[in-house]
Image (cartoon, grey):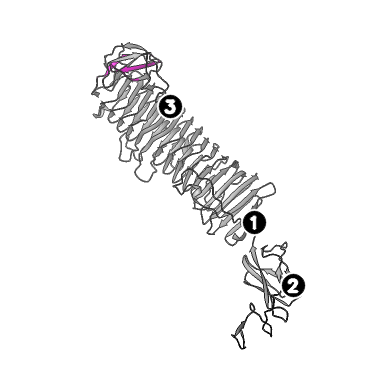
Amino acid sequence: MIVAGGCGSDKIITPDNPIDSGGSTLPSPPLSWSASNYTAILGSDQNVFPTLSNPHDLAVTFKSSNTEMATVNASGAVTLVAPGTVSITANTAATDQYAAGSASYLLTIKKNADDGTVTTVFDSAGDPSSEDDIANTTFTRLVTITYSSSGASISGYGDLTDVMNVTIKGNQVTIAYTGTECVAYKLTGTASDGFFKLDSSKKQALWLSGLSLNCTSGAAINIQSGKRSFVYVEGTNTLSDGASAAYASGDEDMKAVFFSEGQLVFSGKGSLEVTANNAKEKSGISSDDYVRIMNNPSITVSTGSSAGHGIRGKEYVQLSGGLTTINSAGTMKKGIVSDDYVLVEGGNHTITVTGKMDYDTTDEEYKGTAGIKADNYFGMTGGTVTISNSGTGGKGIRAGSEDYQGTLSASYISGGTLKISTEGKESNDVSCKCLNVAATTESGNKVTAYAGNLNISGGTVIVNAENSEGIEVKGNLVISDNAQVYVSSKGDDAVNCQAELDVTGGYVYAYSTANDAMDANHDLKISGGYVFAISTRGDSEVALDANTEERYKLYITGGTVVAYGGLERSYSSTNTVYSMSCTAGGWNALHNGSSYIAAFKAPDGVSSVAVCSPGLSKGYKGVNVGSTTFANGVWATSSISGGTEVSLGSYSNGGSGPGGGVPPGR
């Protein structure tokens, strides 16, 4: 700094406050750059830097604000060193005509022309209070991988190359990411032999948008990160493997066509079709954590006869929405399987199982297939699930396993619609069941502390078993509230539990042509609801059976009961049990003298039943009912009219077996 003396106050001469020898201010030099901002690409020969306008040809020196990012030589040529932002400045010294001056421009240096620095927020998946809702995560980087016949290309990772290692070999894309940003990976295009493999330090979004990816060697998508993967489905997408896919990956876990070490959460409005063609028992979709389907994606999974399960979530599988179709043909495999629980909250899900049973050399026992298998419990609060299993020893739903570590939680159904049918036969001590809640430890037919229980308090359950029990529960079975349960079996009990069976509410229809309609190895208690139990076998089997051999009993203390095939001997009822003639294949009703109690639809061949209900005084056959019916259309409680009145007669068990025969009609 120079201080100029004089008679007045001193003046400070700086580059911004120049004066001539006579004290007058000099003008700034006419320096300017052709642009105030410029973005350059590191390593590119296409960069065209701003030019300096210096019309009076003044002497100029150049400077970079950060030489670790860019340097500039004496003639103004810039050399890029590393990504970042610097100022490039031209300086002139003071002259007789001009004060000292400068001009600068801002230089941004990137590693890639498309750095992907965009903010991506996806539509809500329908559960804004949950971390599983993709809308609750903001993705600050979008990386796009495009597959094609000429090989995959990638864009958007720009200045992330120091934390994102990308390897591309044809259509085989491998990314290792160690950064701190949440990245969305958009996968699009077509490849007949390729894959996407990711190992990441942060949760990520996989944006499937018109992707068709087949991998002949293993997983088409392989997420080796334990972090949550949001899978946003847009447009039409397909994933598949090859019949000869070896899935050879050394120590690396790779269990499915679409595999993740971490959580897989599906959402969106598009479709995804996954096909497992392999012969290595690898599944369609699998997570070593959990799988959740939300919102509205349409997901179809098909597995071949030597492939694995349809969908597997080690921790759990949660179906909160979506349209899911699973076709499982794998030997001993399941449509949906979890080492813990399976929970259905919404959506529409169809599972078709055609796989066969076989001998498991690891566990040294024969095993069958299942539509849904949960080692702990099965829960359902909404949505629709339709399961069909035609395999020998095949089950619709199996909850509870000897392999589960801990005491089983009770399985439950409180809403939604569950439809199950099985067609296979028992073989090698592997039986078919439609809905089976098992035990972790059993001793013959004795119930242990580890037995699985089932509570049905709502929703609709429709079960059709061709050669087996419809519902079998190793622990207690409770049907209550507004549950609607329809069970038909041609091969065994319609409903069986090895502990206590309680009906406190709801609508029940149990029909067996081969055994008991409802059978409990402990007490069978009916205190509410509407129960229609039918056994047409006609010898020792009955409609309502309790284990009297071990001093258990049938108790009827309330509700409305209609039975064909006899009641367990020594039953106890607080209301009178009558016999009543009815219209086979048609609607019949019970009346209390002033109004109809309920109407029931008798199956073909059933023309007389035992009936019991508080206040019951007469019956009607051939009645008409309105459009509101329950338990698959066999019960009605309103809009009942017409019919022919029939008198009620005394009920007697009769017959040769312990439960008695068909009650006489009138």
The quadrant in which residue 25 appears is bottom right
Foreground: 21 or 436? 21
Q: CA distance from mark 2 to mark 1?
A: 34 Å
The quadrant in which residue 475 appears is top left
Amino acid type at image mark 2: Asn
Q: Nearer the viewer, mark 3 or mark 1?
A: 1
Quick one: SS at disc 2? loop
Q: Nearer the viewer, mark 3 or mark 2?
A: 2
Amino acid type at image mark 3: Ala
Crowding near the residue tagged with mark 1, few <14, some 14–19, many ≥20 C-alpha atoms within 10 Å = some
Residues shaded magenta: 576-598
Quick one: SS at disc 3? strand
Going from the N terminus, do you reach mark 3 or mark 1 first?
A: 1
Q: Which mark is residue 465?
A: 3
Quick one: SS at disc 1? loop
Q: Quadrant of the C terminus?
A: top left
Q: Which mark is residue 114?
A: 1
Going from the N terminus, do you reach mark 2 or mark 1 first?
A: 2
Q: Which residue is mark 2?
A: 54
**x and y percent of residue 522 in the render?**
28, 31
Foreground: 10 or 84? 10
**x and y percent of residue 418 in the render?**
43, 32
Amino acid type at image mark 1: Asp
